[in-house]
Image: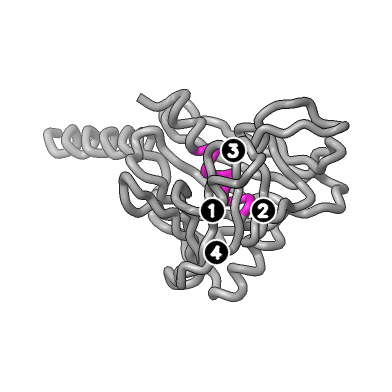
Amino acid sequence: MKRKIQFGAAFISAVLLLAVTGCSSSKEELPPTDEGQEALKNASVLTMKGDLDDIVADSDIWADGQAAGHIQERGFWDSKYTISTGSDESWFYLRYVTDEPINDVEGVISGNTYGYYDMNDNCLGYAQKQILETDTLERDWYTVFMDADGNPKDYLADDDIMRIFDYDGNVIATGSFSFGGFFHYDEYTIEVKEEEGSERKMDFEDKMCAFLRIHYKVNSDYGG
């Protein structure tokens, strides 16, 4: 009888442990590098996950529901967010920029700037908060996406990059986040989704910047 009671207690403990911890959070097996990069570039929906207890960002990236890449934050005061595919093959990285000419353009009122770089430190583009006002946009802070030379692309976003739209105000993509259930209330999912029917497409690097801004918002507003 004693052995049965011990077994029953162990079984109940195991069930409770699974209920609290959920499924394994181990890294998904990713497709080969080229296949993963193509999936990420062409995905209509990109999904990343995190936990409010996490010190740094470290998540697989799902392209239309399939694991295709990984994002990992390295460093603390000078963080780099490295995107990898395949067998942990680094692709490019993003970082907060404070020391480049893009931060001091004459006539531009700018704020936070992210830069994208290949693994040889060649710039691929920027996303920068700027105060803008046009015939269709009210004077406000927007996130302007630019190429490596600082030329604006044909879409921009609101301050938190939750809505991405063209200069006529047509939404081309949205960002969102949601939290887990009762046992996983600290876990969250971030999604960047292209607007159905939109002819304009966001570059993958810009979508990763959107993820970082939403990641920052979630941790600032809800983190301990």
| Circle 1 residue | 101
> Which of marks 2 and 4 precedes in the sequence?
4
Question: Is 34 inside the magenta-drawn segment?
Answer: no
Q: Tell me where residue 40 appears, x and y as whole percent.
A: 63, 61
Question: Is 211 inside the magenta-drawn segment?
Answer: yes
Query: Which of the two discs, 3 and 1, sits closer to the camera?
Result: 1
* Residue drawn at point x = 19 percent, y = 37 percent: 4
Q: In the rendered structure, which amino acid carries the disc numbered 1? A: Pro
Q: Tell me where residue 161 appears, x and y as whole percent.
A: 64, 37
Of helix, strand and loop, which one carries label 1?
helix
Query: Which of the two discs, 2 and 3, sits closer to the camera?
Result: 3
The disc at residue 123 is 4
The disc at residue 146 is 2
* Residue drawn at point x = 71 percent, y = 36 percent: 163
3D distance between C-alphas at marks 1 and 2 = 13 Å
User: Front-most of 116 and 150?
Assistant: 150
3D distance between C-alphas at marks 2 and 3 = 13 Å
Query: Which of the two discs, 4 and 1, sits closer to the camera?
Result: 1
3D distance between C-alphas at marks 3 and 1 = 12 Å
Q: Look at the image and give the residue range highlighted in magenta.
A: 206-215
| Circle 3 residue | 110
> Which of marks 2 and 1 precedes in the sequence?
1
Mark 3, other Cα within 10 Å: few <14 / some 14–19 / many ≥20:
some
Mark 2, other Cα within 10 Å: few <14 / some 14–19 / many ≥20:
many
Give the side of residue 222 with respect to residue 177, left or right. left
Of helix, strand and loop, which one carries label 2?
strand
Q: In the rendered structure, which amino acid carries the disc numbered 2? A: Met
* Residue drawn at point x = 14 percent, y = 34 percent: 1
Q: In the rendered structure, which amino acid carries the disc numbered 3? A: Ser
* Residue drawn at point x = 63 percent, y = 44 percent: 106
